[in-house]
Amino acid sequence: MAMTTLVYTHRSSLRHETPPGHPERVDRIKAVYSVLESPHFAGVVRREAPRAIEQQLLMAHSPEHVQKIMAVAPESGFEYIDADTVMSAHTLEAALRAVGAATAAVDAVFRGEADNAFCAMRPPGHHAEQNRAMGFCFFNQAAVAAYHARQRYDAERVAVVDFDVHHGNGTQDIFWADPNMFYGSTHQMPLYPGSGAVSETGVGNIFNAPLRAGDGGVEFREAMNSIILPALDSFAPDLVIISAGFDAHVRDPLGSLELTEEDFAWATLRLMELADSHARGRVVSVLEGGYDLQGLAGSAGVHLHALMHGETLAAALDQAEEDEDES
């Protein structure tokens, strides 16, 4: 059965410029948008991302952080927050629209307008801490969306699951002392930003499952099955947010994991199953990393396909796994 899936986009993602040679470049979102033009996604309902307002940002970020990013946004040229994180004339608008997409997606799934949603936006957000922009990220859209669900819809427990190759230190930082917010991450370690050890547990709400360079689908699925998914099941979230980074793909230049499109589809379906069990199927996915254009496009495509056709694909996946076990 086809799911009702929304996709949020906005032209501002195409206007956020970075210097030549920067990995987080406009071509990334062009690659994702080209996939959306495929006939496979003709049934997807598309919406324009609204602009987040300051009060929404303050649910996850300090006033000092929000004011700093607003103040340093340049009218022309580039403004470096750090060596990796750079703003141009349209960056602030793109970052605000990325957050707005995530909060609008939460609105849609809680109002019953859709089963799930994918926010095809940039810049990414999971490295943005409560009081710090870093790692190409300015505001943490996954974290803001989680607190928006709590404030607007009385969601008691919200989970963010992150399979980007880099650890989402920002989401972990924001959720660290909040027992009703869950953060689960698979990521390569050691790698930027240096956080994400198993010992980093917050108040029992943080679950890190680091992988080693060279690990592939077998190790990834084991980490999900042994750590992330059981913890998520026990947490019983009212909403599942996916920080969908696709730079764990075997082709990606910024990591050394060896995942394929099939691994991302598998993870998406497993998270959807737990959302069905606990959250009435409510899933919001936000785009994070992914820097090889071919790997990003293919992975985003299978991720969205899984969101659209969850039950049918999950049944086929279960049958395939049974056949493999029998053989």
Image (spheres, rainbow, N blue to C red):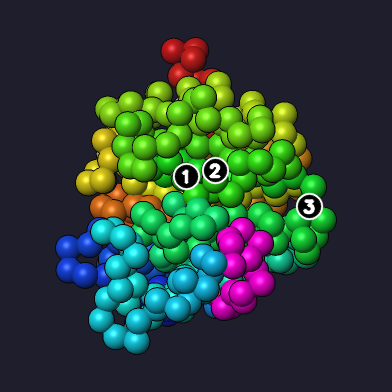
Cα gap from disc 3 to disc 2, whole angstroms? 19 Å
Q: Residue at x 78, y 52 (%)?
A: 155
Q: Residue at x 49, y 15 (%)?
A: 325
- Name, please, the residue furthest toward the right: 154
Task: Return the residue at label 2.
Answer: 172
Query: Circle 1 sits in a helix, a strand or a loop, which is it?
Result: helix
Q: Is residue 187 above or below residue 91?
A: above
Cα gap from disc 1 to disc 2, whole angstroms? 5 Å
- Give the quadrant of the C terminus: top left
- Name, please, the residue furthest toward the bottom: 75
The disc placed on residue 155 is: 3
Q: Main secondary structure of the magenta part?
A: loop
Query: Circle 3 sits in a helix, a strand or a loop, which is it?
Result: loop
- Residue 297 relative to residue 146: left or right: left
Between 216 and 174, the one nearer to me in the picture: 174
Q: Is residue 268 above or below residue 58?
A: above
Task: Find out whether residue 56 is within the magenta segment.
Answer: yes
Callout 2 amino acid: Gln
Could you tell me if residue 90 is visible in this image? yes
Verify CB contact (< 8 Å) between mark 1 and mark 2.
yes
- Give how far across and how far down residue 282 sits, in percent: 70, 52
> Magenta segment range?
49-63
Callout 1 amino acid: Asn
Task: Return the residue at label 1.
Answer: 169
